[in-house]
């Protein structure tokens, strides 16, 4: 797979990898939302617009997962009536959206961030606390070596 | 190879888990290299896992077994002794409805007890370092041995200023409404309280199960109470009161249990109904976070403004998945969360705060053991409002940042010292139970602490001080509340 090939290459060549963390934004309450402020360490690496778009899409996906509306009420009531055994057969709406998010991040990594030497980690692997962005420094390119 | 090991465990045979862990540590150490371990086996909190990580409970589960026994014995007696009479003389719908209620109660109890309440996984070392750097930059340089100032961040939610506190154990800034449970040593999202009756924390993910459990239990209790009384009255119309009691002696026991339970359980249901309709947690209500008495323009920023919406959101909202992925396999390159303090700045403060450790256990044991240490199974009557009183599990005290550091130490000392633990029902509460309780797994406890053996040995000398620490902690907690 192209992604794995690129990443393995990066890891072989990388001398140092540093990590940037985008924290959660709690200004809208307890819903899952990440700060869209552009981290300064990425200034030279990626286009600001592109990054903010990625974060915004991610935030929208999480909002969709946590949306409280007719559909989620229906799911909740149905689950309650079956004493929550229905979740043995089907996934919750949240889990479905999480899968969608995982696909989105993979796609973003493959198309945009891996070629720039960056790697986005799915926030669910960090307990939805942060979006971890790993910056790979290319040893073969860096000067003086 | 792991498939072979998985098979017996899939049947949820407790014996199988024990067998796997009865091997001496060295061989286990050998085997560690071959068997990919699951994340629950190295989980840093003070929880117990059963069924290969599917079931997650708090350390002390004695009171949970009491709850189970009380429910099953009372319902069993009802079905065995009262139902035949009632079914034949009144209607067979009575045992049917009773049965449905009984299974619903048990189902909700198991879901509340066995699921992850919404534990926040601890920060990975890189994250923690990044946060420390950010906070260090904000606070300015500090000398060695200098106790770090309380770390808080302010955020404005819906017009209300909310303080986010930094958890020293989990090395994260706690989200709003999250709190660190010192009994389980985890940060829990939307922390309500730690319920010993259910043997677990009550938080975001299992609050609805807890609420449905107490609601259905109150219906069941009232149902059994009413129909046992009906039974006795009908019988005494025929044969006289005393002979009616003689004919069905179980009814007396049932009436007693139900009578004393009804007050506390109905009360608790009512209290939680109020909390749900105002979208507050027990923790917030007890601290009066959103009450008008604190400040004139204080209001709850999380409330949707309308009782129906609040109820629907709490009970029928989307169920978030578990963040701790307890059954996942540990990848060798996955950063493991910090399970003990290893920063040099922490050592100074941990020494200082050893005696001012995470303060709640003693207070909790005080509030639960209202019946005293006397009867091994304090009757429910003496434990009025058990859950509500246990709410402030760790009201984050900004003046004592070291609390959580010492909380770390407690985690590590666990395999060696168990005296500092709260004793709900004394005999079966030691972490390596000699086991009057058939369901406790001594081996599971070993598994939980498998990763902690080495650092724990450093803290042996402190074990003698544990009783003293308990009392100091209790005093500290009482004075701070």
Image (tube, rainbow, N blue to C red):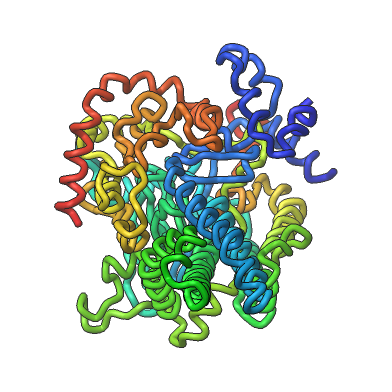
Position of residue B334 relative to residue B192, above or below, is: above
Could you say where residue B119 lies in the image, as x and y percent from the top left?
A: 50, 51
Q: Name the residue located 77 percent from the left edge and 33 percent from the top edge.
A: B7
Q: Residue furthest front?
A: B239
Quadrant into which the C terminus of chain A falls? top right
Could you say where residue B184 lies in the image, as x and y percent from the top left?
A: 42, 45
Position of residue B189 relative to residue B288, above or below, is: above
Residue B218 in view (yes/no): no
Could you say where residue A11 lies in the image, as x and y percent from the top left?
A: 69, 34
Towards the viewer: B103 or B278 = B103
Residue B387 in view (yes/no): yes
Towards the viewer: B228 or B193 = B228
Left or right of B2, for residue B60: left
Q: Name the residue located 61 percent from the left edge and 69 percent from the top edge.
A: B85
Report which quarter residue B345 is drawn in. top left
Q: Name the residue located 36 percent from the left edge and 42 percent from the top edge.
A: B425
Q: Total of numbered circles in the picture?
A: 0
Left or right of A75, for residue B41: left
Position of residue B222 relative to residue A42, above or below, is: below
Q: Name the residue located 63 percent from the left edge and 81 percent from the top edge.
A: A69
Report which quarter residue B54 is drawn in. top right
Could you say where residue B103 lies in the image, as x and y percent from the top left?
A: 63, 62
Left or right of B368, for residue B468: left
Quadrant into which the N terminus of chain A falls? top right
């Amino acid at each position: 797979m192209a992604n794995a090939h690129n990443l393995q290459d990066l890891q072989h060549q990388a001398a140092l990898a540093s990590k940037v963390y985008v924290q959660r934004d709690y200004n809208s309450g307890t819903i899952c939302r990440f700060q869209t402020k552009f981290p300064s360490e990425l200034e030279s690496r990626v286009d600001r617009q592109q990054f903010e778009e990625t974060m915004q899409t991610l935030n929208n996906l999480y909002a969709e997962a946590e949306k409280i509306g007719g559909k989620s009420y229906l799911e909740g009531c149905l689950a309650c009536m079956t004493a929550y055994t229905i979740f043995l057969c089907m996934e919750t709406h949240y889990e479905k959206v999480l899968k969608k998010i995982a696909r989105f991040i993979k796609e973003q990594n493959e198309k945009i961030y891996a070629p720039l030497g960056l790697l986005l980690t799915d926030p669910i692997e960090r307990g939805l606390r942060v979006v971890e962005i790993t910056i790979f420094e290319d040893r073969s390119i860096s000067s003086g070596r | 190879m792991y498939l072979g090991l998985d098979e017996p465990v899939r049947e949820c045979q407790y014996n199988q888990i024990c067998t796997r862990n009865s091997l001496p540590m060295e061989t286990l150490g050998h085997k560690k290299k071959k068997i990919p371990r699951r994340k629950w086996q190295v989980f840093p909190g003070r929880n117990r896992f059963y069924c290969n990580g599917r079931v997650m409970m708090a350390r002390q589960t004695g009171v949970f077994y009491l709850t189970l026994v009380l429910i099953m014995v009372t319902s069993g007696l009802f079905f065995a002794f009262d139902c035949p009479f009632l079914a034949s003389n009144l209607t067979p719908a009575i045992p049917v409805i009773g049965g449905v209620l009984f299974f619903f109660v048990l189902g909700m109890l198991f879901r509340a007890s066995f699921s992850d309440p919404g534990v926040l996984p601890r920060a990975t070392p890189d994250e923690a370092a990044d946060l420390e750097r950010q906070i260090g930059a904000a606070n300015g340089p500090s000398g060695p041995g200098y106790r770090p100032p309380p770390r808080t961040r302010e955020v404005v939610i819906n017009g209300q200023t909310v303080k986010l506190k930094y958890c020293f154990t989990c090395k994260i800034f706690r989200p709003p409404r999250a709190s660190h449970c010192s009994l389980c040593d985890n940060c829990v999202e939307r922390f309500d309280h730690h319920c010993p009756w259910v043997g677990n924390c009550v938080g975001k993910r299992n609050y609805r199960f807890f609420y449905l459990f107490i609601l259905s239990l109150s219906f069941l209790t009232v149902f059994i109470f009413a129909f046992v009384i009906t039974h006795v009255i009908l019988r005494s119309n025929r044969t006289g009161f005393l002979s009616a009691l003689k004919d069905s002696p179980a009814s007396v026991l049932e009436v007693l249990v139900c009578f004393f339970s009804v007050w506390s359980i109905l009360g608790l249901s009512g209290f939680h109904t109020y909390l749900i309709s105002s979208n507050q947690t027990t923790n917030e209500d007890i601290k009066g976070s959103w009450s008008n008495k604190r400040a004139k323009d204080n209001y709850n920023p999380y409330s949707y403004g309308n009782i129906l919406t609040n109820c629907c959101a709490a009970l029928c909202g989307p169920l978030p998945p578990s963040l701790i992925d307890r059954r996942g396999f540990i990848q060798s390159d996955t950063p493991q969360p910090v399970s003990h303090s290893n920063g040099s700045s922490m050592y100074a403060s941990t020494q200082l705060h050893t005696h001012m450790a995470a303060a709640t256990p003693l207070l909790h044991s005080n509030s639960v053991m209202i019946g005293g240490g006397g009867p091994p199974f304090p009757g429910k009557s003496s434990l009025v409002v058990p859950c509500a009183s246990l709410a402030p599990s760790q009201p984050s005290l900004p003046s004592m940042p070291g609390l959580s550091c010492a909380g770390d130490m407690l985690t590590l000392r666990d395999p060696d010292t168990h005296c500092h633990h709260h004793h709900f029902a004394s005999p079966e509460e030691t972490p390596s139970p000699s086991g009057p309780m058939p369901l406790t797994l001594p081996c599971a406890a070993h598994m939980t602490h498998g990763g902690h053996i080495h650092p724990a040995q450093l803290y042996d000398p402190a074990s003698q001080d544990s009783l003293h620490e308990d009392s100091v902690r209790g005093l500290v907690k009482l004075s701070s509340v």
